Image (tube, rainbow, N blue to C red):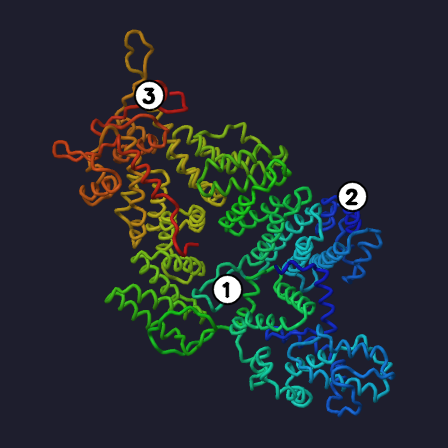
Amino acid sequence: MSSGIPPWRVTASATATATHYPTHATPAFIPVQARRSFAQNAQVSTPAAPVSNPAPSQPSDSQPRKKVDWPLPVRMYVQRCFASENQISGVSREEMETKLKAVITEAADADRLSEVDWDHLPLPQVMIQNERIKSLTNPAVSAWGGASIMASPSNKRKSIEASLPRETDTSPPWRQTNHRNAFEDRVTYPKADKRQKIDMKNLSKSKTNLEMRKKRFEDPRAGYGSSPASSRGDSPAADAHRGPIVGRCQNLEKNYFRLTSAPNPDTVRPLAVLEKTLDLLKKKWRKDNNYGYICDQFKSLRQDLTVQHIRNEFTVSVYEIHARIALEKGDLGEYNQCQTQLRALYRQQLGGHPTEFKAYRILYFIHTRNWTAMNDALADLTAADKRDPAVKHALDVRSALALGNYHRFFQLYLDTPNMGAYLMDMFVDRERLSALAAICKAYKPDVKIRFITEELGFESDEQAARFILDHTSADLLQEQGGLVKLLTGKAGQLFEVARAEAHRVVDIKGQI
Amino acid sequence: MAASIYEDFKQGHSLGSGDRLAASLTPIAPAEYPDRLRAFYHSGSGDVPDLHRTLFRNHKLKLPKQEQAAWVDIYTAYWKAAGELVKLDDGTEGASWSKVFDAWKATANALIRGYSTSSLQAWTLPCLYVIGKYLRLFAMRADAEQPSQESIGFNDDLQDDVVADFEKSAKLEEAARIMNRMFTLCLSDRAPIEDSRKWGIYSTTNLLFKTYFKLNSVGLSKNLLRALNASSADTPELEAFPKSHIVPFEYYVGVIHFLDEKYAEAEQHLTYAWKMCHRDAFKNKELILTYLVPCHIVTTHTLPSKGLLAPFPRLEKLFRPLCDCIRKGDLVGFDAAMSAGEEEFVKRRIYLPLERGRDIALRNLFRRVFIAGGFDESKNGQPPIRRTRVPVAEFGAAMRIGTHADTKSRIDMDEIECLLSNLIYKGLMKGYISRERSMVVLSKGGTAFPGTGV
């Protein structure tokens, strides 16, 4: 848990990094480090300068000889250089030693051995890293000053390949970063993290802990409080500033794929093409009636509209047509997605058929029994909406059901405008069971099947009888003098059970 | 005598008073000391050692090092937030609620860090409440100042659909996520109960409920209830919590059930809240009654008395016209009252249950048919018995009156039967319909209309 680090420690390690510089570099952090290294430019470049100087004196490779003329702070400094917890992955021992030699030689030559603040001087490996970071962010510098540094490890690239794959690339790292788009960054981000962790296994424990702690705090700090959503949203947000893309694809048809990276203009169709696509799809739907194909095509159509930020009357009609087709095929998940979008689109007055879909919306919430959403749907209606026949019909349906007025409900069912009947079909059986439960409780001793047929909107006595038999048993229907009757007294409990079963909460995929 | 922020901080610690401590983090100056926040801002420089000195050394306050650091963190962030508030107050260019919110958010995060690292003790929880409270308020102000509500933003490009619907309350959603962490912080504390943050669960839950209601995502509240339920084993009894925590909690739980049309459960919770509510908390009582009255109408078919609503003129105005029509069995009046109040009812989310009052109005109308039917001739000197066999046509005639139908319009007898069957089904009438004879046979012995005396 990221919040598990005590804040004062966080502050402590933050101040520590300010002097020692961050010791790890993942692509996403580079800009931050850049700014720091600019601020410290002067300090960094001073020790960097003598790199080219050949080292005249010869301190030993592994341990400096304990000569009397090396003051204690210098010896301590050298010891720290070789201490395992101070090693930095990516800076080899040779590089570090070369640098160390240069630093000490420079000080000795200038007779400043006693003046340099050895206790606080950055370690050579840290200097090397800072120079690299600086050169990463400032190509001009790397062209001359950084060249030797960048070149020096070239003979051993292979050995560090695993830990530093970026440096093994032939193109300069800053270019890579720039060429990468934000989405790739987002994808590679966790990988970079993993690499970091593997490296840490090579480090001593205390160093690892320090690194881990720093990492832990750095991540949440960046997007503190906004938790996953905003840290996830960082890169797309940056991307959004670039504005919408404009497609160049001329194909009318396109399969739907969920985007996992920034859209490629070559595979996105511009508005003029999309308009032709819609015509084609309408024709194909009439001709072939192949829902799988149509749904897929409409989803790619919607996606192309979205990535190009096209939001106009055409957009509305695309969503409306897709919604109607989904309704016809009973694909409520897809229908609901369209409906949610349409609700927002209508608010912007882009045309289309708002009342038709507001009516569907009410019917849809009757079906899903989502009363909270129903209340919102009611709140959305204007006085003018309520005068619209379709909206009025949907409201009457809702009210009839709320009051258990099945008589009125089934009259409305038989006279539904637009495509509302597709939605009502989905809950009409459920409401028939409710009505039968009430009828069986209220009517004694029996009712004619014809009465059921008429009251509950069945097409024939036969259909009504079959429906009753599906939920009860055969002995509840009796024939007397050529008329079939339902023995209400006995059937009540059975319908009550069936009703409760049917009224369990409807769970629809894609529902808000 | 209002104290300075530092004074409250010091006193809070030396008295061990969470409320006093929280007072120092309250970003609204008390009336007696209107410049309190300004004074705090101008007294400091945002410099950490400085603040540390002011908070601890100057006051000779001895706290563990960790805790000191946590408080310095919190007050550093708080000082910056105070700065934003002062700038806003001064009308400084560039100042905004949005900046206030961001600074406040940082304060909240510092506080949360303090708790999650266990450097702050549970008695300081009132600080969490205060910070949470203003986090919500500042978020709403920040959302309100967003320039154009008209332009709905686009989803990021990875989305398939055109419109992102959430941007108009982005800050409040952000605040909700932080509050959720506050809630988890309290719920997941495993310290012994005397010194546990568990005492904060209801307060933080209430804050989240409030926010979710505002965000129109009541559904999220159920996750909280589930989480609370899952850890109920090691949570103290509800009664052990301060009333100021449990009254709002019960109220919200009641309303959540209410919105799900679970009126029986809703009534139980709302009644609890009603009984525990402080008698002078007028606003709260009014809120509770707004939902309890419709609940009661649905579950018990009874109307609120004049005496109950008398102290609440707004509720009286809201419910009385409907209640009068229900009592008289005036269906036309009822429908008119419903549509007259529709906007307000929908806004308060009580339209759907109130609509069910129509059943009671209908019951009252039909009851009058029964009473008008008089008595059958008494036999053998027995007390007279009401006529319990009533032709459906008589109920049809009553409907004609109840709906103010003119003489020419046809009354649909099948619909009358349907309404009768519903009343019987719902237990508002007792008896049965004989379709063969077009006759309603009501039960004898004063139970034809249960609970109404006939």
Residue placed most toward the observer, B73 or A241: B73
Indicate left or right for B425 with B170 as reference. left
Residue B9 horizontal/vertical position (percent): 77, 49
Secondary-structure class at tag 3: helix
Work out which residue is located at the far left of the displayed protein and give it: A482
Q: Residues within 10 Å of mark 1 (few under 14, many from 20)?
A: some
Looking at numbered disc 3 in the image, what kind of residue is underneath it? Ala
Q: Is residue B142 above or below residue B414?
A: below
Q: Quadrant of the N terminus of chain A?
A: bottom right
Residue B92 horizontal/vertical position (percent): 70, 62
Query: At 64% from the left edge and 34% from the top edge, which residue is drawn?
Result: B280
The residue that label 3 is drawn on is B372
Q: Residues within 10 Å of mark 2 (few under 14, many from 20)?
A: few
Numbered tag placed on residue B153 in the rendering: 1
Secondary-structure class at tag 1: loop
Q: Chain of mark 2?
A: B
Indicate left or right for B299 with B377 as reference. right
| Visible residue check, residue B406 | no
Which numbered disc flags the more N-terminal residue, 1 or 3? 1
Residue A423 horizontal/vertical position (percent): 32, 51
Residue placed most toward the observer, B268 or A50: A50
Residue B123 horizontal/vertical position (percent): 71, 45
Query: At 55% from the left edge and 37% from the top edge, which residue is drawn?
Result: B288
